[in-house]
Amino acid sequence: MRVSASSAALCAGLLLPGASATIYYAGVAQSGGEFAVWSATSAKGTGLPGRFGVDYQFISTSGVDIMTDEHKVNLHRVAFLLERMCPPSDGLGAKFNETHFDYFKEAIDYITKTKGAYAILDPHNYMRYNDPSSQPFSGSVIGNASDPTAATTEQFGAFWGELASRFADDEKVIFGLMNEPHDMPSSLVLENLQAATDAIRAAGAKNLIIAPGNSWTGGHAWTEGGDEASSNWMHKLVDPAANTAIDIHEYLDEDFSGGHTACTQDAATHLEGVTAWLREHKLKAFITEFGGSNTTACATMLEGMLDYMAQNDEYIGWTAWAAGPFWGPNSPCCTDQQQFGSLEPGSKAADGGPSLYDTIWVPVLQKKVPAELQWSGIASVDGGELTAKP
Protein backbone atom coordinates (compact mmCIF):
# COMPACT_ATOMS: atom_id res chain seq x y z
CA MET A 1 0.00 0.00 0.00
CA ARG A 2 1.56 3.32 -1.05
CA VAL A 3 -0.53 5.72 0.97
CA SER A 4 -0.68 5.93 4.83
CA ALA A 5 1.11 4.47 6.52
CA SER A 6 6.84 -18.46 -9.54
CA SER A 7 8.43 -21.08 -9.10
CA ALA A 8 9.13 -24.47 -10.64
CA ALA A 9 6.40 -26.92 -11.39
CA LEU A 10 3.62 -25.62 -9.20
CA CYS A 11 0.56 -27.80 -9.36
CA ALA A 12 -2.19 -25.87 -11.12
CA GLY A 13 -4.72 -26.64 -13.79
CA LEU A 14 -6.59 -24.76 -16.45
CA LEU A 15 -10.17 -23.94 -15.59
CA LEU A 16 -12.23 -26.46 -17.48
CA PRO A 17 -15.54 -25.49 -19.08
CA GLY A 18 -18.27 -25.71 -16.48
CA ALA A 19 -15.80 -26.08 -13.60
CA SER A 20 -15.76 -23.82 -10.58
CA ALA A 21 -12.65 -22.05 -9.40
CA THR A 22 -11.94 -22.26 -5.70
CA ILE A 23 -10.96 -19.69 -3.09
CA TYR A 24 -9.35 -21.54 -0.19
CA TYR A 25 -8.26 -18.57 1.90
CA ALA A 26 -10.08 -15.27 2.47
CA GLY A 27 -9.68 -12.52 5.00
CA VAL A 28 -8.14 -9.20 5.92
CA ALA A 29 -4.75 -7.54 6.23
CA GLN A 30 -3.82 -6.56 9.79
CA SER A 31 -1.88 -3.31 9.62
CA GLY A 32 -0.24 -1.75 12.67
CA GLY A 33 3.07 -3.48 13.21
CA GLU A 34 4.66 -1.04 10.75
CA PHE A 35 3.28 2.11 12.40
CA ALA A 36 4.97 5.12 14.05
CA VAL A 37 8.20 5.41 12.06
CA TRP A 38 7.25 8.04 9.48
CA SER A 39 8.96 11.45 9.77
CA ALA A 40 7.89 14.69 8.11
CA THR A 41 11.58 15.61 7.91
CA SER A 42 12.78 12.14 6.91
CA ALA A 43 14.64 11.83 10.21
CA LYS A 44 16.35 8.45 10.08
CA GLY A 45 15.60 6.28 13.07
CA THR A 46 12.27 7.92 13.88
CA GLY A 47 10.09 5.62 15.99
CA LEU A 48 12.64 2.83 16.28
CA PRO A 49 12.36 0.53 18.05
CA GLY A 50 9.06 1.98 19.26
CA ARG A 51 6.87 1.04 22.20
CA PHE A 52 4.72 -2.01 21.67
CA GLY A 53 1.10 -1.31 22.50
CA VAL A 54 1.71 2.44 22.40
CA ASP A 55 3.35 3.24 19.06
CA TYR A 56 2.53 0.04 17.21
CA GLN A 57 0.69 -3.23 17.63
CA PHE A 58 0.21 -6.21 15.35
CA ILE A 59 -3.42 -7.17 15.98
CA SER A 60 -6.37 -6.56 18.22
CA THR A 61 -7.45 -9.94 19.55
CA SER A 62 -11.05 -8.75 19.73
CA GLY A 63 -10.90 -7.64 16.10
CA VAL A 64 -9.44 -10.98 15.05
CA ASP A 65 -12.18 -12.71 17.05
CA ILE A 66 -14.93 -10.83 15.24
CA MET A 67 -13.42 -11.32 11.81
CA THR A 68 -12.76 -15.02 12.36
CA ASP A 69 -15.76 -16.07 14.44
CA GLU A 70 -18.51 -13.82 13.10
CA HIS A 71 -17.36 -13.14 9.55
CA LYS A 72 -15.84 -16.61 9.09
CA VAL A 73 -12.57 -15.48 7.53
CA ASN A 74 -9.67 -17.93 7.71
CA LEU A 75 -6.77 -15.63 6.76
CA HIS A 76 -5.02 -12.64 8.35
CA ARG A 77 -1.98 -10.91 6.82
CA VAL A 78 0.11 -9.42 9.63
CA ALA A 79 2.50 -6.55 8.86
CA PHE A 80 5.80 -5.99 10.64
CA LEU A 81 8.97 -3.95 10.05
CA LEU A 82 12.35 -5.50 9.34
CA GLU A 83 13.99 -2.69 11.32
CA ARG A 84 12.14 -3.73 14.46
CA MET A 85 12.77 -7.43 14.03
CA CYS A 86 16.41 -6.84 13.06
CA PRO A 87 17.58 -3.49 14.49
CA PRO A 88 19.84 -1.50 12.13
CA SER A 89 22.53 -1.48 14.82
CA ASP A 90 22.86 -5.22 14.26
CA GLY A 91 21.92 -5.32 10.59
CA LEU A 92 19.53 -7.51 8.65
CA GLY A 93 20.07 -11.21 9.24
CA ALA A 94 19.56 -14.01 11.71
CA LYS A 95 19.97 -11.90 14.87
CA PHE A 96 16.56 -10.78 16.11
CA ASN A 97 15.27 -8.42 18.75
CA GLU A 98 13.85 -11.26 20.81
CA THR A 99 11.41 -9.10 22.76
CA HIS A 100 9.93 -7.81 19.52
CA PHE A 101 9.84 -11.29 18.01
CA ASP A 102 7.97 -12.61 21.04
CA TYR A 103 5.27 -9.96 20.58
CA PHE A 104 4.99 -10.88 16.91
CA LYS A 105 4.84 -14.61 17.59
CA GLU A 106 2.17 -14.04 20.21
CA ALA A 107 0.01 -12.37 17.55
CA ILE A 108 0.63 -15.11 14.97
CA ASP A 109 0.00 -17.86 17.50
CA TYR A 110 -3.28 -16.23 18.46
CA ILE A 111 -4.43 -16.33 14.85
CA THR A 112 -3.22 -19.83 14.00
CA LYS A 113 -3.33 -21.76 17.26
CA THR A 114 -6.08 -20.02 19.23
CA LYS A 115 -8.41 -19.11 16.37
CA GLY A 116 -7.47 -21.89 13.93
CA ALA A 117 -6.99 -19.52 10.99
CA TYR A 118 -4.02 -18.97 8.64
CA ALA A 119 -1.56 -16.07 8.93
CA ILE A 120 0.65 -14.41 6.32
CA LEU A 121 3.89 -12.96 7.68
CA ASP A 122 4.29 -9.59 5.95
CA PRO A 123 7.62 -7.70 6.12
CA HIS A 124 6.19 -4.34 5.10
CA ASN A 125 9.43 -2.91 3.69
CA TYR A 126 9.15 -2.46 -0.09
CA MET A 127 12.41 -4.47 -0.52
CA ARG A 128 14.26 -1.81 1.47
CA TYR A 129 16.01 -1.82 4.83
CA ASN A 130 17.66 0.55 7.35
CA ASP A 131 15.43 3.66 7.14
CA PRO A 132 11.62 3.44 7.10
CA SER A 133 11.17 7.14 7.96
CA SER A 134 9.74 7.98 4.53
CA GLN A 135 8.36 4.68 3.39
CA PRO A 136 7.78 3.53 0.75
CA PHE A 137 10.76 5.36 -0.74
CA SER A 138 13.31 5.59 2.07
CA GLY A 139 15.87 2.97 2.98
CA SER A 140 18.47 1.16 0.91
CA VAL A 141 17.33 -1.37 -1.67
CA ILE A 142 18.21 -4.83 -0.41
CA GLY A 143 20.95 -6.37 -2.54
CA ASN A 144 22.03 -3.09 -4.19
CA ALA A 145 25.77 -3.71 -4.50
CA SER A 146 26.44 -0.07 -5.41
CA ASP A 147 25.06 1.14 -2.06
CA PRO A 148 27.51 0.46 0.79
CA THR A 149 24.72 0.94 3.34
CA ALA A 150 22.42 -1.65 1.77
CA ALA A 151 21.70 -5.04 3.28
CA THR A 152 22.87 -7.82 1.01
CA THR A 153 20.88 -10.50 -0.73
CA GLU A 154 22.64 -13.02 1.50
CA GLN A 155 21.50 -11.15 4.61
CA PHE A 156 17.92 -11.18 3.33
CA GLY A 157 18.21 -14.93 2.89
CA ALA A 158 19.64 -15.32 6.39
CA PHE A 159 16.74 -13.34 7.81
CA TRP A 160 14.18 -15.57 6.12
CA GLY A 161 16.02 -18.73 7.07
CA GLU A 162 15.89 -17.73 10.72
CA LEU A 163 12.26 -16.60 10.64
CA ALA A 164 11.21 -19.75 8.79
CA SER A 165 12.96 -22.00 11.29
CA ARG A 166 10.90 -20.43 14.07
CA PHE A 167 7.57 -21.05 12.33
CA ALA A 168 8.33 -24.28 10.47
CA ASP A 169 6.22 -26.31 12.89
CA ASP A 170 3.11 -24.20 12.26
CA GLU A 171 1.53 -25.36 9.01
CA LYS A 172 -0.92 -22.47 9.10
CA VAL A 173 1.82 -19.85 8.72
CA ILE A 174 2.38 -18.48 5.21
CA PHE A 175 5.60 -16.68 4.33
CA GLY A 176 4.94 -13.45 2.40
CA LEU A 177 8.47 -12.68 1.26
CA MET A 178 8.17 -8.90 0.87
CA ASN A 179 5.60 -6.15 0.55
CA GLU A 180 5.61 -4.26 -2.76
CA PRO A 181 9.13 -4.13 -4.23
CA HIS A 182 9.42 -1.17 -6.58
CA ASP A 183 11.86 0.99 -8.53
CA MET A 184 14.64 -1.57 -8.69
CA PRO A 185 15.87 -4.08 -11.26
CA SER A 186 13.51 -7.02 -11.60
CA SER A 187 16.53 -9.29 -11.76
CA LEU A 188 17.42 -8.17 -8.23
CA VAL A 189 13.86 -8.74 -7.01
CA LEU A 190 14.13 -12.30 -8.31
CA GLU A 191 17.60 -12.78 -6.83
CA ASN A 192 16.41 -11.69 -3.39
CA LEU A 193 13.29 -13.84 -3.57
CA GLN A 194 15.36 -16.85 -4.60
CA ALA A 195 17.74 -16.36 -1.69
CA ALA A 196 14.81 -16.19 0.71
CA THR A 197 13.15 -19.27 -0.80
CA ASP A 198 16.36 -21.28 -0.68
CA ALA A 199 16.93 -20.33 2.96
CA ILE A 200 13.36 -21.18 3.94
CA ARG A 201 13.59 -24.64 2.44
CA ALA A 202 17.09 -25.19 3.85
CA ALA A 203 15.61 -24.46 7.29
CA GLY A 204 13.28 -27.41 6.80
CA ALA A 205 10.12 -25.32 6.46
CA LYS A 206 7.53 -26.66 4.02
CA ASN A 207 5.15 -23.72 4.53
CA LEU A 208 3.44 -21.97 1.65
CA ILE A 209 5.47 -19.05 0.27
CA ILE A 210 3.93 -16.11 -1.57
CA ALA A 211 6.29 -14.10 -3.76
CA PRO A 212 5.70 -10.58 -5.11
CA GLY A 213 6.72 -9.02 -8.37
CA ASN A 214 8.26 -5.63 -9.10
CA SER A 215 6.33 -2.37 -9.66
CA TRP A 216 4.48 -2.57 -6.33
CA THR A 217 3.50 -6.13 -7.34
CA GLY A 218 0.55 -4.58 -9.19
CA GLY A 219 -1.53 -7.00 -11.21
CA HIS A 220 -2.34 -4.31 -13.78
CA ALA A 221 1.41 -3.69 -14.33
CA TRP A 222 2.52 -7.32 -14.40
CA THR A 223 3.17 -7.47 -18.13
CA GLU A 224 4.25 -3.83 -18.47
CA GLY A 225 7.72 -2.29 -18.38
CA GLY A 226 9.51 -3.99 -21.25
CA ASP A 227 12.41 -6.15 -20.09
CA GLU A 228 11.69 -5.17 -16.47
CA ALA A 229 8.12 -6.49 -16.53
CA SER A 230 7.45 -8.94 -13.72
CA SER A 231 6.08 -11.35 -16.31
CA ASN A 232 9.61 -11.76 -17.70
CA TRP A 233 11.10 -12.78 -14.36
CA MET A 234 8.90 -14.13 -11.62
CA HIS A 235 8.14 -17.52 -13.18
CA LYS A 236 11.87 -18.23 -12.92
CA LEU A 237 11.69 -18.50 -9.13
CA VAL A 238 12.46 -22.09 -8.19
CA ASP A 239 10.94 -23.70 -5.13
CA PRO A 240 12.13 -27.27 -4.48
CA ALA A 241 8.98 -27.86 -2.41
CA ALA A 242 6.71 -26.60 -5.22
CA ASN A 243 4.65 -24.64 -2.71
CA THR A 244 4.98 -21.03 -3.83
CA ALA A 245 2.21 -18.75 -5.10
CA ILE A 246 2.35 -15.24 -6.53
CA ASP A 247 1.46 -12.21 -4.38
CA ILE A 248 -0.54 -9.56 -6.24
CA HIS A 249 -1.91 -6.16 -5.21
CA GLU A 250 -4.62 -4.34 -7.11
CA TYR A 251 -6.36 -1.08 -6.26
CA LEU A 252 -9.19 0.37 -8.28
CA ASP A 253 -8.54 4.11 -8.35
CA GLU A 254 -7.13 6.24 -11.17
CA ASP A 255 -3.43 5.54 -10.51
CA PHE A 256 -3.82 2.13 -8.84
CA SER A 257 -2.37 3.56 -5.61
CA GLY A 258 -5.34 3.10 -3.31
CA GLY A 259 -5.20 6.79 -2.44
CA HIS A 260 -8.36 8.06 -4.09
CA THR A 261 -12.07 7.84 -3.35
CA ALA A 262 -13.25 7.24 -6.90
CA CYS A 263 -13.00 3.73 -8.32
CA THR A 264 -12.26 4.02 -12.05
CA GLN A 265 -10.07 1.00 -12.89
CA ASP A 266 -12.05 -2.18 -13.28
CA ALA A 267 -10.04 -5.10 -11.95
CA ALA A 268 -11.60 -7.67 -14.24
CA THR A 269 -10.08 -5.79 -17.17
CA HIS A 270 -6.73 -4.95 -15.65
CA LEU A 271 -6.08 -8.45 -14.29
CA GLU A 272 -6.42 -10.14 -17.67
CA GLY A 273 -2.69 -9.98 -18.42
CA VAL A 274 -1.45 -11.38 -15.12
CA THR A 275 -4.18 -14.04 -15.13
CA ALA A 276 -3.09 -15.22 -18.57
CA TRP A 277 0.53 -15.25 -17.35
CA LEU A 278 -0.41 -17.31 -14.30
CA ARG A 279 -2.25 -19.76 -16.51
CA GLU A 280 0.64 -19.99 -18.97
CA HIS A 281 3.11 -20.84 -16.21
CA LYS A 282 0.69 -22.99 -14.20
CA LEU A 283 0.94 -20.74 -11.16
CA LYS A 284 -1.48 -19.78 -8.42
CA ALA A 285 -1.93 -16.37 -6.80
CA PHE A 286 -3.23 -14.45 -3.82
CA ILE A 287 -4.37 -10.85 -4.01
CA THR A 288 -3.23 -9.67 -0.59
CA GLU A 289 -4.03 -5.98 -0.96
CA PHE A 290 -7.05 -4.37 -2.56
CA GLY A 291 -9.69 -1.95 -1.42
CA GLY A 292 -12.19 0.72 -2.26
CA SER A 293 -14.10 3.58 -0.74
CA ASN A 294 -17.75 3.73 0.27
CA THR A 295 -19.16 4.70 -3.11
CA THR A 296 -21.62 2.81 -5.25
CA ALA A 297 -19.05 2.48 -8.05
CA CYS A 298 -16.49 1.05 -5.63
CA ALA A 299 -18.96 -1.45 -4.24
CA THR A 300 -19.75 -2.66 -7.76
CA MET A 301 -16.08 -2.93 -8.74
CA LEU A 302 -15.08 -4.67 -5.50
CA GLU A 303 -17.82 -7.24 -5.95
CA GLY A 304 -16.73 -7.71 -9.55
CA MET A 305 -13.11 -8.19 -8.49
CA LEU A 306 -13.96 -10.85 -5.94
CA ASP A 307 -16.25 -12.56 -8.44
CA TYR A 308 -13.39 -12.51 -10.96
CA MET A 309 -11.08 -14.26 -8.50
CA ALA A 310 -13.76 -16.81 -7.64
CA GLN A 311 -14.29 -17.55 -11.32
CA ASN A 312 -10.64 -17.97 -12.28
CA ASP A 313 -8.78 -21.02 -11.06
CA GLU A 314 -5.50 -19.13 -10.80
CA TYR A 315 -6.62 -17.31 -7.63
CA ILE A 316 -6.74 -19.20 -4.36
CA GLY A 317 -6.90 -16.47 -1.73
CA TRP A 318 -7.30 -12.81 -0.80
CA THR A 319 -6.92 -10.29 2.03
CA ALA A 320 -8.56 -6.86 1.94
CA TRP A 321 -6.62 -3.75 3.03
CA ALA A 322 -6.86 -3.11 5.95
CA ALA A 323 -7.88 -3.64 9.55
CA GLY A 324 -5.69 -3.03 12.57
CA PRO A 325 -5.92 -1.69 16.11
CA PHE A 326 -4.27 1.71 15.63
CA TRP A 327 -6.04 3.20 12.60
CA GLY A 328 -8.62 5.04 14.67
CA PRO A 329 -10.62 7.34 12.35
CA ASN A 330 -7.86 7.29 9.72
CA SER A 331 -8.39 5.28 6.56
CA PRO A 332 -5.91 2.76 5.18
CA CYS A 333 -6.89 3.48 1.60
CA CYS A 334 -9.22 4.90 -0.94
CA THR A 335 -10.52 8.11 0.65
CA ASP A 336 -8.32 11.01 -0.58
CA GLN A 337 -7.13 11.25 3.03
CA GLN A 338 -10.62 11.73 4.40
CA GLN A 339 -11.07 10.07 7.78
CA PHE A 340 -13.59 7.30 7.18
CA GLY A 341 -12.03 4.77 9.55
CA SER A 342 -10.78 1.33 8.57
CA LEU A 343 -11.92 -2.28 8.23
CA GLU A 344 -11.25 -2.81 11.94
CA PRO A 345 -14.45 -3.96 13.68
CA GLY A 346 -15.81 -1.19 15.89
CA SER A 347 -13.88 1.60 14.17
CA LYS A 348 -15.63 4.88 13.39
CA ALA A 349 -15.13 7.77 10.98
CA ALA A 350 -13.81 11.04 12.37
CA ASP A 351 -17.34 12.45 12.65
CA GLY A 352 -18.42 9.42 14.65
CA GLY A 353 -20.27 7.95 11.70
CA PRO A 354 -19.90 4.57 10.02
CA SER A 355 -16.40 3.39 9.16
CA LEU A 356 -15.20 1.42 6.15
CA TYR A 357 -15.89 -1.67 8.25
CA ASP A 358 -19.55 -0.67 8.31
CA THR A 359 -19.81 0.58 4.73
CA ILE A 360 -17.40 -1.69 2.84
CA TRP A 361 -16.60 -4.83 4.81
CA VAL A 362 -20.04 -5.71 6.14
CA PRO A 363 -22.24 -4.97 3.09
CA VAL A 364 -19.75 -5.68 0.27
CA LEU A 365 -16.77 -7.85 1.15
CA GLN A 366 -18.09 -10.10 3.88
CA LYS A 367 -20.80 -11.58 1.70
CA LYS A 368 -18.08 -12.66 -0.74
CA VAL A 369 -16.28 -14.74 1.90
CA PRO A 370 -16.96 -18.31 0.76
CA ALA A 371 -19.14 -20.37 3.11
CA GLU A 372 -16.52 -23.11 2.95
CA LEU A 373 -12.79 -22.49 3.23
CA GLN A 374 -9.74 -24.52 4.25
CA TRP A 375 -9.60 -24.75 8.05
CA SER A 376 -7.11 -27.57 8.55
CA GLY A 377 -3.86 -28.84 7.09
CA ILE A 378 -0.88 -27.09 5.61
CA ALA A 379 -1.47 -24.01 3.50
CA SER A 380 -0.77 -25.05 -0.07
CA VAL A 381 -1.02 -23.98 -3.68
CA ASP A 382 -3.26 -27.03 -4.09
CA GLY A 383 -5.55 -25.96 -1.28
CA GLY A 384 -7.08 -28.43 1.15
CA GLU A 385 -10.40 -29.78 2.32
CA LEU A 386 -13.13 -27.16 2.25
CA THR A 387 -15.44 -26.96 5.26
CA ALA A 388 -17.58 -24.41 7.04
CA LYS A 389 -15.89 -22.78 10.01
CA PRO A 390 -15.68 -25.35 12.82
Image (cartoon, helix red, strand yellow):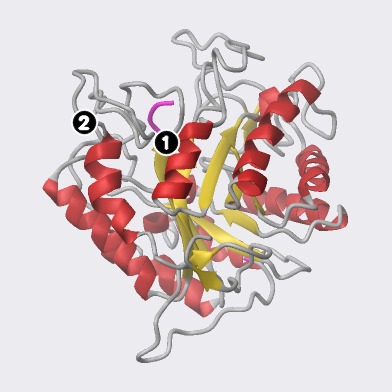
Give the left or right position of residue 387, taking residue 328 as reference.
right
Q: Viewer-proximal residue, 281 or 366?
A: 366
- Foreground mark, 2 or 1, reads 2
Q: For mark 2, what is the residue?
A: 354
Q: Viewer-proximal residue, 388 or 74?
A: 388
Structural crowding at the residue carrying mark 2, measured as other residues with C-alpha within 10 Å and reported as few (<14), some (14–19) or many (≥20) = some
| Label 2 residue SS | loop
Where residue 323 is drawn, which disc sits there?
1
| Label 1 residue SS | strand
Please report the residue visible at 37 percent of the width from the left and 59 percent of the height from the top: 369
Q: Tell which circle, 2 or 1, labels the residue nearer the N-terminal end.
A: 1
Structural crowding at the residue carrying mark 1, measured as other residues with C-alpha within 10 Å and reported as few (<14), some (14–19) or many (≥20) = many
* Magenta stretch: includes residue 324: no
Residue 389: x and y in percent read: 49, 60
Please report the residue visible at 50 percent of the width from the left and 26 percent of the height from the top: 135
Give the left or right position of residue 166, taking residue 256 as reference.
right
Against 184, is 316 above or below?
below
Q: Which residues are magenta?
A: 1-6
Please report the residue visible at 37 percent of the width from the left and 57 percent of the height from the top: 220
